[in-house]
């Protein structure tokens, strides 16, 4: 009716609507018999006439009137029991059946509907049900939970919660259970244990946490019985902030330190192996053997977890015996930031102090035997080398070309001999390119005439003399990379005080036998000397550091994942800063602009050369042919890399001179060659000296011939030159104004300050190689401005090479010199 539904009574019927009806059962005694009947009230007034239920939601009462029937409809506040329809009429219970009725049926009836009693009848007292939790404790901190509802009238135990047969339990609900009470019981449990779920078994720290924190709250519930099977352990939660102490003690392995971790909470020590294992697995809590447990979600543990995860990538790192190399200063610094207390071994403190701050390095006087006067920056470099040597650390001396890296290194060797006297010391081993071995010999004789230097310039097969006999009594042994590789076995077994790698970019490829053999030469001190510690990629840097500072970085694979890809591909500035922070203590890099301001400026100019008509036509035709070939190979670039580079090289040669790729094109003039000759004729006429570099010896010879045809004398040097020293001395003496040098042969080991003009005929992929060549003349001792011309053929592959050069130069500067952004890739473009 409230919803607007119209009720239409039958003829002679009057409808009334009550607000609320209540139904109950009433028991009374008549003639010694128990009578049970249903009674109803509508709006507080007893229904005296007949009435019947309407479904389970209301009743209707009716009475006869003079004009027909009066019917009253009223809803009930709660659903009516299904059996009410059977109980509306009175039921007589004989005295002989009363005991059975009150024992078996009355509890069911009372759980279903309210029951009242007349005078002289005492209804049985109500025994409410109870919840029951059974806890079963077993070995290895295992706990099982079983939940049940326990009814006393009628008696019964009904499992609920996880593992219970709920379908069976639901069948038992009607008449035997109190769903409202059970719902209230579940709500009470959820309030005491908000995370209450279907978990019915706990192990380890979860069992401890439940027993110590959740169970006491459940035991406070008035209607819940707790039964324990087995022995209930006494678990204790450790509260408070953890106190972390990290110690470093000298290991039985040279240059390594054992780390110790002491973690205490409220004075109770937490075993580190257990903590380490839990943090590694990402656990949130940890249970100790003494049945105490702690949360691992404290911020201090978050930092420790992250640091230990990174440390797992370090060489020699073992969970049961964590160690650090002297080179891993950055890791120790992170532990210091994390720990409340640190204790380091004295040798570690000394090493770390110097590596953190170059100003902390103690001043060292130059060796007495040195005949040269060290410049200020050279003295600083010498002191840095002496510090590394004293602490058995290695590094990279990466000063710019022409700043005296050889002199600084010889000063260190002399200092090491003086400080070791009068005890005899093993010799230093210097490995250099073949063309530079003689330079080391002459420089040593010039600056340290008392130093005993032995040169190993032939393999064992040729010299017929054991290495031990050759180096006996020497202070320094100088050999080439080729001999060190071929006679690796002898160099591995000889005793060395130190290992010096000159032009160390020779060992930049870790996959070569040379790199592997050099890495295995035993020496407590290792130094790489190179003006280009990174020629092509960050992996070059890893290769050098793996020899000079083993332990600084993880494996090559991990280094690629952590640094190479994020930095070179994604310009990740955070990883770049991290890399620079790791490398800086072990690499000393000074540029001429910063330490030698008195050096005349170097002016660089790009000369763009236009190809002639026939030359352009030929180049474009070959370009289209090679482009089609290369584009078909791009999908598998690594597999076809050799073919791709062959095409690129062909185009580079064609950009120089058509005659380089086929004799039938010699009639087509080279615009670049004409430009070169025009310039050097004018320069030589003004009394200047010129260096001319090219990657291609065939083009270099063509240029030399054109120079001779113009009437200029010249000197020539490439890898096939047998009288290298005579050619160099001849140019220095001034016999020829022009010196043609292949980029590979003249990239190192030369000082040619007599020249003040440099021509680079063809750009190379590697800007560092070009810079080394140019700096043969722009170095200490130069008194005139140096002019550098780079000849680039426009609209050719050479412009692509120049673009790649700029990217690689940015990469070098970002890691070694500054924080510029960079990227490097070889792509189809």
Image (spheres, helix red, strand yellow):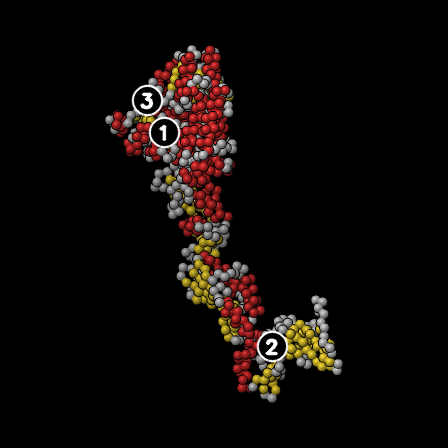
Q: Which residue corresponds to the image point at 42% horizontal and 11% vertical from the top-left?
A: 711
**Residues at marks 2 and 1, CA–CA distance in whole angstroms:** 104 Å
Q: Earlier in the sequence, mark 1 or mark 3?
A: 3
Q: Which mark is residue 450?
A: 3
Q: Residue at x 39, y 12 (%)?
A: 735
Q: Which mark is residue 84?
A: 2
Depth check, mark 1 against mark 3: the one in front is 1
Gap in Å between the C-alphas at discs 3 and 2?
122 Å
Label 1: state its secondary structure: strand
> In this rendering, would 673 be left or right of 415?
right
> How far across and down, in percent of the image, does residue 210 sit?
48, 60
Mark before the other along the chain sequence, 3 or 2: 2
Pinpoint residue 757: horizontal percent, then vertical percent: 46, 17
Which is more N-terminal, label 1 or label 2? 2
- Nearer the observer: mark 2 or 1; the answer is 2
Residue denoted by label 1: 500
Q: In the structure shown, which secondary structural element does the residue marked by tag 3 occupy?
A: loop
Percent position of residue 235, x then y: 45, 59
| Marks 3 & 2, CB-CB < 8 Å contact | no
Question: Crowdedness of circle 3 by 10 Å Cα count: few (<14), some, many (20+)?
Answer: few
Q: Is residue 43 left or right of residue 595?
A: right
Closer-to-camera residue (594/643): 643
């Amino acid at each position: 009716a409230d919803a607007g539904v119209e009720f239409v009574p039958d003829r002679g019927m009057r409808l009334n609507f009550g607000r609320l009806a209540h139904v109950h059962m009433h028991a009374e005694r008549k003639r010694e018999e128990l009578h049970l009947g249903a009674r109803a009230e509508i709006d507080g007034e007893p229904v005296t006439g007949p009435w019947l239920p309407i479904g389970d939601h209301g009743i209707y009462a009716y009475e006869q009137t003079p004009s027909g029937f009066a019917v009253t409809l009223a809803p009930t506040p709660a659903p009516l029991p299904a059996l009410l329809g059977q109980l509306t009429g009175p039921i007589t219970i004989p005295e002989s059946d009363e005991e059975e009725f009150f024992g078996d049926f009355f509890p069911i009836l009372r759980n279903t509907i309210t029951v009242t009693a007349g005078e002289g009848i005492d209804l049985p007292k109500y025994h409410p049900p109870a919840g029951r939790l059974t806890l079963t404790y077993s070995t290895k901190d295992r706990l099982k939970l079983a939940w049940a509802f326990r009814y006393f009238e009628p008696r019964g135990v009904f499992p609920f919660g996880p593992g219970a047969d709920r379908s069976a339990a639901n069948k038992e609900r009607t008449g035997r259970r109190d769903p409202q009470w059970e719902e209230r019981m579940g709500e009470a449990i959820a309030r005491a244990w908000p995370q209450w779920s279907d978990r019915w078994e706990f192990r380890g720290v979860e069992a401890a946490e439940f027993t110590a924190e959740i169970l006491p709250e459940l035991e406070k519930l008035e209607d819940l019985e707790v039964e324990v099977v087995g022995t209930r352990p006494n678990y204790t939660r450790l509260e408070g902030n953890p106190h972390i102490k990290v110690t470093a003690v000298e290991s039985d392995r040279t240059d390594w330190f054992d780390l110790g971790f002491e973690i205490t909470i409220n004075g109770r020590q937490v075993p580190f192996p257990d903590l380490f294992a839990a943090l590694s697995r990402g656990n949130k809590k940890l249970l100790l053997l003494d049945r105490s447990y702690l949360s691992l979600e404290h911020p201090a543990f978050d930092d420790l977890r992250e640091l230990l995860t990174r440390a797992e990538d370090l060489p020699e790192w073992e969970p049961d015996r964590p160690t650090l190399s002297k080179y891993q200063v950055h890791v120790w610094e992170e532990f210091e930031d994390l720990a409340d207390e640190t204790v380091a071994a004295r040798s570690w403190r000394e090493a770390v102090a110097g590596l953190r701050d170059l100003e902390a390095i103690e001043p060292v006087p130059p060796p007495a035997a040195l005949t040269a006067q060290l410049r200020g920056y050279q003295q600083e470099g010498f002191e840095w080398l002496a510090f590394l040597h004293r602490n058995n650390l290695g590094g990279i001396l990466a000063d710019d070309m022409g700043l005296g890296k050889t002199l600084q290194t010889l000063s260190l060797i002399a200092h090491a001999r003086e400080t070791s006297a009068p005890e005899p010391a093993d010799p230093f081993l210097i490995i250099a390119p073949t063309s530079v071995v003689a330079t080391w010999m002459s420089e040593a004789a010039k600056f340290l005439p008392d130093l005993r230097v032995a040169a190993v310039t032939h393999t064992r097969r040729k010299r017929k003399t054991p290495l031990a006999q050759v180096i006996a009594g020497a202070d320094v042994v100088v050999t080439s990379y080729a001999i060190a590789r071929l006679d690796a076995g002898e160099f591995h077994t000889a005793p060395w005080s130190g290992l010096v790698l000159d032009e160390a970019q020779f060992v930049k490829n870790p996959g070569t036998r040379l790199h592997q053999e050099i890495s295995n030469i035993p020496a407590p001190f290792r130094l790489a000397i190179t003006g280009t510690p990174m020629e092509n990629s960050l992996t070059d840097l890893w290769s050098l550091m793996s020899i000079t500072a083993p332990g600084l970085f993880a494996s090559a694979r991990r280094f690629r994942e952590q640094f190479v890809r994020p930095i070179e591909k994604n310009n990740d500035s955070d990883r770049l800063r991290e890399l620079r922070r790791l490398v800086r203590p072990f690499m000393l890099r000074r540029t001429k602009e910063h330490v030698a301001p008195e050096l005349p400026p170097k002016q660089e100019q790009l000369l763009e050369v236009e190809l002639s008509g026939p030359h352009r036509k030929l180049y474009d035709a070959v370009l289209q042919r090679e482009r089609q070939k290369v584009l078909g190979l791009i999908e598998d670039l690594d597999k076809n890399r050799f073919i791709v580079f062959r095409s690129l090289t062909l185009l580079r040669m064609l950009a120089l001179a058509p005659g380089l790729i086929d004799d039938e094109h010699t009639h087509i003039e080279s615009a670049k060659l004409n430009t070169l000759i025009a310039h050097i004729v004018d320069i030589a006429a003004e009394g200047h000296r010129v260096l001319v570099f090219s990657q291609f010896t065939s083009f270099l010879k063509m240029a030399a011939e054109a120079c001779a045809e113009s009437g200029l004398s010249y000197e020539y040097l490439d890898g096939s030159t047998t009288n290298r020293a005579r050619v160099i001395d001849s140019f220095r003496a001034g016999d020829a104004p022009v010196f043609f040098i292949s980029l590979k042969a003249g990239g190192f080991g030369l000082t040619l300050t007599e020249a003040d003009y440099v021509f680079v005929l063809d750009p190379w992929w590697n800007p560092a190689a070009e810079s080394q060549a140019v700096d043969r003349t722009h170095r200490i001792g130069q008194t005139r401005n140096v002019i550098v011309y780079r000849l680039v053929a426009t609209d050719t592959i050479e412009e692509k090479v120049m673009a790649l050069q700029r990217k690689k130069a940015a990469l070098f500067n970002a890691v070694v010199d500054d924080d510029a952004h960079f990227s490097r890739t070889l792509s189809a473009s």
